[in-house]
Amino acid sequence: MERIQRPRGTYDVTPEEAPRWQALEARIRHVAARFGFGELRTPVIEARELFQRTVGETTDIVQKEMYVLTPPGSDRQLVLRPEGTAAAVRAYLENGLHNGPQPVKLFYIQPMFRHERPQAGRYRQHVQFGAEIFGAGEATADAEIIALAMTLFAELGLEGLEVHLNSIGCPACRPRYRQALLEYYRPRAAELCADCRARLETNPLRLLDCKVPADQPHKAGAPRTVDYLCQDCRAHFDELQSALDALGIAYRLDPGLVRGLDYYTRTVFEIKYGGLGAQDTVCGGGRYDGLIELLGGPPTPGVGFGMGLERLLLTLEAAGRPPGARRPLDAYVAVAGQVPRTRVLALVQALRHQGLAVDMDHVGRSLKAQLRAAGRLPVRYAVILGDDEWARGEAAVRELASGQQRRVPLGELAAVLRPAGADAAAETRGSAEVDRA
Ligand SMILES: [Zn+2]
Ligand SMILES: [Zn+2]
């Protein structure tokens, strides 16, 4: 039969790789809890309008990259969630969190779906760690969001990160900036790429997002948002910098950093990793004080970030800091002769009840083949049960690294196999069951 393959741009996490994910996610949950963030889990499917209204009709995400589903017998289209913030806002409003104490601090570790051209470290289903603070407009909230990301990186052992920071103003100061942009770009329109020409009159801020190489010189000379900030935006940006200074977080002011959508306000930031030469953005975020209103909520400020975990894992790997390894087995039980296999299974189970990681043969291999199998596993001890040992209520315990072997009464097996520093509380549970009788 022809084998069926996974969809392009997706990946499997094998048992070999899963511990890295588990360790990374555990670290994220640990840090987020210490910062007072609660976990949010939302459906993979959402209404199509949620992203049309927020991400915008004219964006690549909405036009080309969303997986659209038409459920049988329904004329309402659903999509696989392409990004996390809009879904978090929807959940905040739908669950009445906006009526409770503010601010509300949420984080999520969830897959996002985009039908992009697959490239290294970029997938059509990718996992994002996102954090959002709803209901706090103060610059200390922006500083805390950045500190959350930086604390996570520090605890993962990642060094050489740089925070790039900018302020893009608010609805009060943006019209003046927009006018300056129009005046700058209009005489240059003929030299711009097609996308930029199309967006010039409708949303000139988007031109600053253009990645087309030929347009970069124009971008470099464009008016800067920071020169057009109103008094309130200026004060907010200054306070954010003071807060980062107080936290000892280094940053670089980057006037070219923008987000072209209208609901973004004030702070935008990216965290780049330059530890291995070329800089790579590992986290991006900012303030979106207009977003919650756009989704039918009361005027509510918001700030947050998103972090792609596949890229973070690649970065950690390259930096020699993989976040976790698979737990090795404490023991592999090898059986010979007429020793009753059901009783051995009960022995294995009793050891597991005491917190040990133990496995045994289930396919009737010879003792030699079982020991060979054990040798290929990450396992510390082979526990050998032959007729002779079984009759005496003992086992031969072989440390695989050294080859040293000794006889251990079955009642003392758990204590011998237990790795130094392992959970001692588990020892009180069911140790009597280990006895053969
Ligand atoms: Zn302003
Ligand atoms: Zn362009």
Image (cartoon, rainbow, N blue to C red):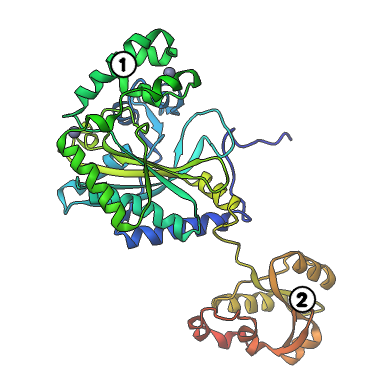
Residue in the image at 26% along x and 47% along y: 240
Q: Is mark 1 within 8 Å of ligand 2?
A: no
Q: Position of residue 19 (x, y in %)?
A: 56, 58
What type is the residue that disc 2 sits on? Answer: Val
Q: Is mark 2 within 8 Å of ligand 2?
A: no
Closest to the camera, between mark 1 and mark 2, is 1
Label 1 residue SS: helix
Q: Could you tell me if residue 335 is visible in this image?
A: yes
Q: Nearer the viewer, residue 301 or 51?
A: 301
Look at the picture and state if 381 lies above or below 377: below
Residue 293 sits in quarter: top left
Residue in the image at 59% along x and 79% along y: 350
Label 2 residue SS: strand
Residue in the image at 61% along x and 55% along y: 15
Q: Quadrant of the C terminus?
A: bottom right
**Where ligand 1 lies, by quadrant?**
top left
Q: Position of residue 374 (x, y in %)?
A: 75, 68
Q: Nearer the viewer, residue 261 or 49?
A: 261
Q: Could you tell me if residue 263 is visible in this image?
A: no
Q: Position of residue 396 (x, y in %)?
A: 76, 84
Q: CA distance from mark 1 to mark 2?
A: 81 Å
Look at the picture and state if 390 lies above or below 47: below
Residue 79 sits in quarter: top left
Residue at the disc numbered 2: 335
Q: Would you say 238 lies left or right of 147 here? A: left
Residue in the image at 54% along x and 78% along y: 422
Residue at the disc numbered 1: 184
Q: Would you say 260 lies left or right of 155 here? A: left
What type is the residue that disc 1 sits on? Answer: Tyr
